[in-house]
Structures are given as C-alpha cells and as structure tokens.
Image (spheres, rainbow, N blue to C red):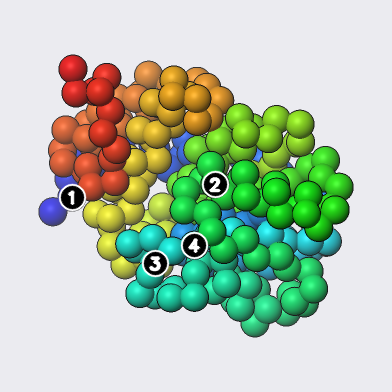
Amino acid sequence: MISAQAWADAQRLWEFQQMGHEPRPSSVAIGLGSHDLGVADATADLYHRGMMPLIVFTGATSRTTRDRMPRGEAEHYRERAMELGVPSDAILVEPRARNTGENIRFSRALLKEHRVAVSSVLLVSKPYEERRAYATACKLWPEVRWISASTPMTLADYMDSIGDARLVIDMLAGAQQRLMIYPQQGFMIEQHVPVDVAAAYERLREAGFTSRLVADTAEAK
C-alpha cells in the first residue's frame, strides 16, 4: 500500500526531473536506452516533426531489459522507430552502453566516426530522468547545446503504462539520489535541488523506496 504522502513526494520528484525545454531543430537526437519503448516513440515523433535529420539510439541490456529486449535496447528502439516510419538510414545504433555516462560518451564517438557535425542535441529519455540525463550530458560533452525531451505525460499515466507504481517510485528515488550525489563524484554537473525536493526524496527513502538506490558513503554516515 502506497501512502498519500508517498504519492505526493513522488509527484514532486516527477515535476522536478522535468526540464521543461521546448524542442527545437537540432543536429541529432540521442535516445537513451531503457526498459521504456516510449523513448523510441518520442524520438520518432520528434523526427517526424522535423526536429533533427539523424537519431542515435544507445543502450545494451540490463537486468530489467535482457528478457524483454534480448537484441539490446538500442536495437529494439531502432526497430520500434522504423515501425513508426523513421527510415533506417536516419538511425545509428550504439549497442554497448550500460549507463548514462556511457550513452553519452559512446554516442559522441559514434557520431565522430560517422563524421557528423554536432552543435546541438535533443536528448530523449524517460520522463523521470530528464534532469539526470541533462546533467550528465552537460558534464561529458559541454561543447554542444543540450535540449531535454521525453513523452509528455502525467505521473499517473506513466505508472499505468509501466504497470508497477512502486517500481516507478523506486526509480524516481534512484534518479533523484544520483542527481544529488553524482556531481561530487564527477559524473554530472551540479543541479540546484530545492529544499522540498530533497525532503520528498528523504521521506521516500525512509519509507523503503530504495531498490534503485546506489551505495553512498555520505548517506551511510
């Protein structure tokens, strides 16, 4: 049973993770691999709106995707985008990345290999990871302009699409934790975290929404 307080705290984290960027024409889109095929849908929609001429789908598999996406997240994304009318020659596949940092580094290397000039990137992620992905990308590739994008939807609708509300809250807590501890570890740029957002995260952690948290010595002390 998820309490009313946990629902409210999850909603606050959901709102904070959304960057609120307006999509604009860019050199390329990078779709970050995950369990959520909605990322491929959102990327395909941006392509059909003329926002970019080229897509990179990046991602290997993880414990949450190896059964559902045995050919790799990026490959399944590519297949989904092609089903939605994106031509195959508008898609590059980066099949090795296993975390957000690798998504950015490996995609950058792939674009360089293909001699693609990049000045701006539409960074397409799950809705609750926009800010985390943005902060990582700005750290690892600061020379380009990053614009965050995801499927526009409410938290309730996203939970319905995943079919596991508790898992979604766990993932929200995990994304928020990384946003707060990874800058000190050099993985992403600092993002100001409002007091109420930090408090919402702490309440969710104390309530046991911890399956997606990483070990952090500062929190352990």
**In this rendering, is residue 113 above or below 174?**
below
Mark 1 residue crowding within 10 angstroms, few (<14) / some (14–19) / many (20+): few
- Quarter of the view holding residue 209: top left
**For numbered disc 2, what is the local secondary structure?**
helix
- Tell me, yes or no, if residue 101 can be seen here: yes
**In this rendering, is residue 116 above or below 133?**
below
**For numbered disc 3, what is the local secondary structure?**
loop
Q: Is residue 7 left or right of residue 105?
A: left
Horizontal and vertical percent position of residue 112: 78, 49
Q: Is residue 216 left or right of residue 99?
A: left
| Residue identified by numbered label 1 | 2
- Tell me the distance, in whole angstroms, between the alpha carbons under discs 3 and 2: 17 Å
- Tell me the distance, in whole angstroms, between the alpha carbons under discs 1 and 3: 25 Å
Q: Which mark is first along the chain, 4 or 3? A: 4
| The disc label shown at residue 64, or none | none
Rendered residue at 86%/47% (across/down): 117
Q: Nearer the viewer, residue 99 or 32?
A: 99
**In this rendering, is residue 150 above or below 83?**
above
**For numbered disc 1, what is the local secondary structure?**
loop
| Residue identified by numbered label 3 | 65
Q: Amino acid type of disc 3?
A: Thr
Between marks 3 and 4 in the image, the one whose residue lies nearer the viewer: 4
Mark 3 residue crowding within 10 angstroms, few (<14) / some (14–19) / many (20+): some
- Quarter of the view holding residue 81: bottom right
- Tell me the distance, in whole angstroms, between the alpha carbons under discs 3 and 4: 9 Å
Q: Which mark is first along the chain, 2 or 3? A: 3
Horizontal and vertical percent position of residue 69: 44, 73
Q: Amino acid type of disc 2?
A: Glu
| Residue identified by numbered label 2 | 102
| Residue identified by numbered label 4 | 60
